[in-house]
Image: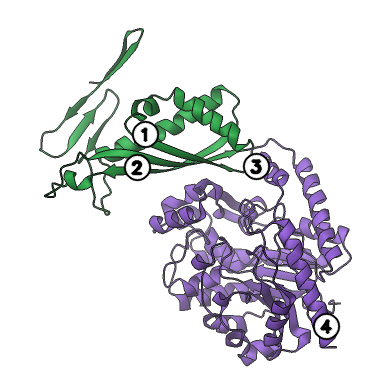
Chain colours: A purple, B green
Amino acid sequence: MATSFSPFTTSIIGSWPRTKEILIAQRKLRKGQMEQSDFDDLIERETARIIKIQDDLGLDVIVSGELSRDNYSSFVADRIGGVSMMSMDDIVDYIDDKKAFEDILSILDVPAISITNAICTGKLEYHPIAVNELKLLKKYTDKPVKITLPGPYLLTRSMWIPKLSKQGYASKEELGKDVVKILEQEIDNLQKLGVDIIQFDEPVLTEVVFTEGKPRSFMCAALSERKDPTEELEFAKSLIKPVLEHIDRSKSIASMQVCRGNWSNDESILLTGPYTPLLDLFENVSAEMLTLEFSTPRAGEISSLLGDEKISKDHIIGLGVENPRLHEAESTDFIVGKAKEALKYIPKERLFLNPDCGFATFSNRPVNKEEFIINKIKSLVDASHQLQAEYK
Amino acid sequence: MEKRYLNSANNYDIEFRAISTDGKKVKIRTDKVSYSVDEEMSFDIANDVLTSVDHFTGGIASGMISAINRYDQKHDGIIDQIEGKFTFHLSNPLTYLDVRGYDETPHVSALDLQLYLVSFNEADELEQVYQEAMKNSIVYQTIKDTIKIEHKIKVVL
């Protein structure tokens, strides 16, 4: 039986900044200097703490914080067979536009060795991906819970480097078929345990439509053999739709999260543009919920998305009302104002509130700090309560 | 043929031949390998052949990083990985290009180095490793009085 949610349900997107202890433990584990059981104990302790923070602050849906992951996507290298973790230093030889890559490293002031990607180097083999995160969530909270997973298009595109991946697959289309199967198995396992929202992250979609033929390698590994945006979006649809359709809607909400990149605190270098070029995809991938960023002017007008009847009539909108990269908490007035804009197009029952994106998409480059995040959650929850009182 | 030998307790000599027969390329021949260098310096952004200056600056970069590795491994071994972003400043390039009105000596005048050190240790400890490593770096000690070197260390977990 699916959980019923109140109007203006609140949650954060998924990732939470790791403590220094976790970052050190991640490296030690990778180097074989730490026992897996000790690492797991640390992750459980910290996850329990973060769950309690969310619970105490009054969020409606709780997330794990993705603490064991090195980043939102590449962590699958540790979970799926046939996938290798590679640093951008390893991958850059396969990237066409090396200068663009260097420019991004310079802007971020990060070394290539610190950016990791999961690359397909053989036949994929399923092992549980986020099942342990869900078990921890179920152990430490009775509230509804959300599991976040990298989407099938993101995984397929970022894992595909022909020279390496052809050891397992003749084409990225063939790889995509197995990515879909892997995610379907994961969905089955998550739903067996009980999960209220399954959210697939697909940030590369905005790279496809907003970068005018020059996708930034940083966000999406190589994006090699990239076709024109129309073909790419068709390919994306062919992967995302079967995965979202596989989610049993009587048990969980099927959500897709699409942002414009969350890798820098410098807003001027992040992508800009309304979701309009993605409307056709949004309408046709069977997402029950669209979790989208709307807190910054970069995202365009809410009307550009919700003015589309198919979107406004058929979907729950997880409205991004907070910029995860800003330390200062948004005012409740700001959040309420954003929600009221959306309410012109969708009923309150289908309006959820959340930040635009995660707070620590990349474990070693969080975009915010816990002390500020707590204030942002307070604003989010206060705004939700205010809206619930006003729209009883 | 290259010769490498200690000719006294205080000296070690490195000899090799450099040969140019076509008025352009220079072949470096050592006892193990030989390689060709096309020109001293190229300003063509499409150039994909290593020049003398590329070898020179690359040698400085690799020498400094190797010196850090060497020192660290002989001591506490606190550095996991090293990545450096090297920016060399070339003064008076127009003289090199024979542009009229320019006659100041062209030379590599400065190096800005951003060092990323993957380590569990604190920045001040890593700075100490860098300083000690440079004291025993042949490359660093050779260039430090002619090239102004500024460095910053960023610790990466």
Residue corresponding to mark 1: B60
Q: Amino acid at mark 2?
A: Phe
N-terminal of the pair, mark 1 or mark 2, is 1
Q: Kindly identify which chain the residue marked by label 2 belongs to.
A: B
Q: Amino acid at mark 1?
A: Ile
Depth order, front residue of B53/A193? B53
Can residue B90 be seen in the rendering of this structure? Answer: yes
Q: Secondary structure at mark 2?
A: strand
Query: Of the numbered discs in the image, which one, if any, rests on residue A388?
Result: 4
N-terminal of the pair, mark 4 or mark 3, is 3
Q: Amino acid at mark 4?
A: Gln
Question: Relative to residue A303, is residue B67 depicted above or below?
Answer: above
Residue corresponding to mark 3: A27
Question: Relative to residue A24, is residue A391 depicted above or below?
Answer: below
Depth order, front residue of B46/A284? B46
Question: Mark 4 or mark 1: which is in front?
Answer: 4
Q: Specify whether B1 is left or right of A330.
A: left
Residue corresponding to mark 2: B88
**Same subunit, tags 1 and 3:** no
Do labels 4 and 1 touch, CB within 8 Å?
Answer: no
